[in-house]
Image (spheres, helix red, strand yellow):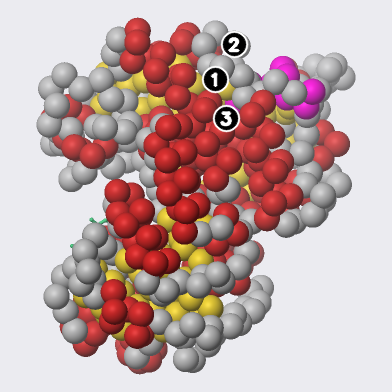
């Protein structure tokens, strides 16, 4: 299946933090891939901006090596990288000072789409927004893209929203959550709202529970000091897992339109019940496999920050009242995998003697690795041995469907950056959504801080703390195994 590429209008995209890790690893390689796909009009420009002194030529050298480092040989070729680099420029700029802003103003054209990607620490967002606005570099049509973390609690998120709102309208602000750019996540909406098959069953009468898992094998290596001020709840649950939960739980929007979709997501967040302390398990990884434990990584021997969290969330509305959503995410776990598993209820009565006859169907939406969707159904075991039943997956791997090596599946950033240029905010978080998510997360965090709870320890390369198993056992359920 060849994916269709719809060209966008010519644009200037300025990347503040153009020399940083995210720009080199994700943003520029994604733009290159879109360039190769023919989506970037020939006279569009990408302008890196940071404090480091460099000419555009020196910056191109940096980006050339980033392409080699972060794109597999199958996804690049030297000639097209050189063509792409002709569109790349650099401006030396200090976000909090005066240097470079006049140069940027001269460079950015006002007669076309322009977008400004804030790939810098959030403490710089306000200074950049102010200068772009006050110096007339941005106009009423310009877009700004802001990276996570969007605040560290409700108060800071509100302040940040208010600061950005001083200079830009909500329609100009693109709060990125790269999970929403993943092909499977968008497919979740297609599966739910472009088929009649699932929607009639998509409610508490037929869905027993939902498990959302984002497991990582890496620790916090290298950014332990920062992570220790955040933790898994702030870093992953409040944003990424929450977005996944919303897409599973939301009502059908009246149209696939930014505000219609985001209105429905917001209703889900607002309907979330407070989480009881006994429904939360937090953990910290121990040393093992030649690697340090969390506390050494965080350089904080008394740290109470969680590198793992599992919790049971409830949604107080007619559709979901008796269907718990179990969320878990953690570092240094057995495998790197992200998935949503929707467990349907068992048939009310089994006509078969085989005990398997009463097994539940499970719809598994895999985000990584091997993006795809698989539905576990019961069939008769082949052969003449009587009516024996077995569970088999109806498997749809997007890699198989879209290309022989999966190379046609675009990276989430490819999709999202192009959506910014197209002016489509559907896959970006609205300000009120972010605030509602913090309003749910804040009391949970404040609760364990006030109680002085300490995270449980867990061995690396496992599925996390033992107590997290109990969270489901207690309800007569089991987590899906964490495996590649
Ligand atoms: P990074 O590697 O530390 O890069 C920071 C960038 O900001 C550098 O290009 C730096 O260049 C520039 N910068 C710092 N101070 C500046 C100033 N005063 N004026 C202008 N430029 C300045 O950080 P990163 O990992 O790329 O992350 C950037 C943002 O994305 C952060 O908000 C982070 O939370 C978020 N994020 C990152 C990732 C990731 O995978 N890396 C994932 C999700 C979100 P100079 O030193 O040359 O100025």
Which residues make up the magenta segment? 318-325
Label pair 1/2, CB-CB below 8 angstroms: yes
Name the image quarter holding the C terminus.
top left
Name the image quarter holding the N terminus.
bottom right
Residue 356 in the magenta stretch? The answer is no
Quarter location, residue 217: top left
Mark positioned earlier in the residue sequence (3 or 2)? 3
Of residues 147 and 208, the one nearer the viewer is 147
**Left or right: 359 in relation to 424:** right
Secondary element type, mark 3: strand
Q: Report the residue marked by disc 3.
A: 211
The structure residue drawn at horizontal position 82% and vertical position 33%, both measured from the top left corner, is 201
Q: Position of residue 313 (x, y in %)?
A: 57, 22
**Left or right: 349 in relation to 227:** right
Q: Position of residue 106 (x, y in %)?
A: 35, 85
The structure residue drawn at horizontal position 79% and vertical position 54%, both measured from the top left corner, is 255
Crowdedness near tag 3: few (<14), some (14–19) or many (≥20) residues, C-alpha within 10 Å: many
The structure residue drawn at horizontal position 30% and vertical position 10%, both measured from the top left corner, is 452
Between marks 1 and 2, how big is the CA–CA gap? 11 Å
Q: Report the residue marked by disc 2.
A: 475
Mark positioned earlier in the residue sequence (3 or 1)? 3
Of residues 240 and 65, the one nearer the viewer is 240
- Image quarter for ligand 1 equals bottom left
Of residues 172 and 358, the one nearer the viewer is 172
Is residue 244 in view? no
Q: Report the residue marked by disc 1.
A: 312
Crowdedness near tag 1: few (<14), some (14–19) or many (≥20) residues, C-alpha within 10 Å: many
Quarter location, residue 462: top left
The structure residue drawn at horizontal position 50% and vertical position 72%, both measured from the top left corner, is 139
Between marks 3 and 1, how big is the CA–CA gap? 9 Å
């Amino acid at each position: 299946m060849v994916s269709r590429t719809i060209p966008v209008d010519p644009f200037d995209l300025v990347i503040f933090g153009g020399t940083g890790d995210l720009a080199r690893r994700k943003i520029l390689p994604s733009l290159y891939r879109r360039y190769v796909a023919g989506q970037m009009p020939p006279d569009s420009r990408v302008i890196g901006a940071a404090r480091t002194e460099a000419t555009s030529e020196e910056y191109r050298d940096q980006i050339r090596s980033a392409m080699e480092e972060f794109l597999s040989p199958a996804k690049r070729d030297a000639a097209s990288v050189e063509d792409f680099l002709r569109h790349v420029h650099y401006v030396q700029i200090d976000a909090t000072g005066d240097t470079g802003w006049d140069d940027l103003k001269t460079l950015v054209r006002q007669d076309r789409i322009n977008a400004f990607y804030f790939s810098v620490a959030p403490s710089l967002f306000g200074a950049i927004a102010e200068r772009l606005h006050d110096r007339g570099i941005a106009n009423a049509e310009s877009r700004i893209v802001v990276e996570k973390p969007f605040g560290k609690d409700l108060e800071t998120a509100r302040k940040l929203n208010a600061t950005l709102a001083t200079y830009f309208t909500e329609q100009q602000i693109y709060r990125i959550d790269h999970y929403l750019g993943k092909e499977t996540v968008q497919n979740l909406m297609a599966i739910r709202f472009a088929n009649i098959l699932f929607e009639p069953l998509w409610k508490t009468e037929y869905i027993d529970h939902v498990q959302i898992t984002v497991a990582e094998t890496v620790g916090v290596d290298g950014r332990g000091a920062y992570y220790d001020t955040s933790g898994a709840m702030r870093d992953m649950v409040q944003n990424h897992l929450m977005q996944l939960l919303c897409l599973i739980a939301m009502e059908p929007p009246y149209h696939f339109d930014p505000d219609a979709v985001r209105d429905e997501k917001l209703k889900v967040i607002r309907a979330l019940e407070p989480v009881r302390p006994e429904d939360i398990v937090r953990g910290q990884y121990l040393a093992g496999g030649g690697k340090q434990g969390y506390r050494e990584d965080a350089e904080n021997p008394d740290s109470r920050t969680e590198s793992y969290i599992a919790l049971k969330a409830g949604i107080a509305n007619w559709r979901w009242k008796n269907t718990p959503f179990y969320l878990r995410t953690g570092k240094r776990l057995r495998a790197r995998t992200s998935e949503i598993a929707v467990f349907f209820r068992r048939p009310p009565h089994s006509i078969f003697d085989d005990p398997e006859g009463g097994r539940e169907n499970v719809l598994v939406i895999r985000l990584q690795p091997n993006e795809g969707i698989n539905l576990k159904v019961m069939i008769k075991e082949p052969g003449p041995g009587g009516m024996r039943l077995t569970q088999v997956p109806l498997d749809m791997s997007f890699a198989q469907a879209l290309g022989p090596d999966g190379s046609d599946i675009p990276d989430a950033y490819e999709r999202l950056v192009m959506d910014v240029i197209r002016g489509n905010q559907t896959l970006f978080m609205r300000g009120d959504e972010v605030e509602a998510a913090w309003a749910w997360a804040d009391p949970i965090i404040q609760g364990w801080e006030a109680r002085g709870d300490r995270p449980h320890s867990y061995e690396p390369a496992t599925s996390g703390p033992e107590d997290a198993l109990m969270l489901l056992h207690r309800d007569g359920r089991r987590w899906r195994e964490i495996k590649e």
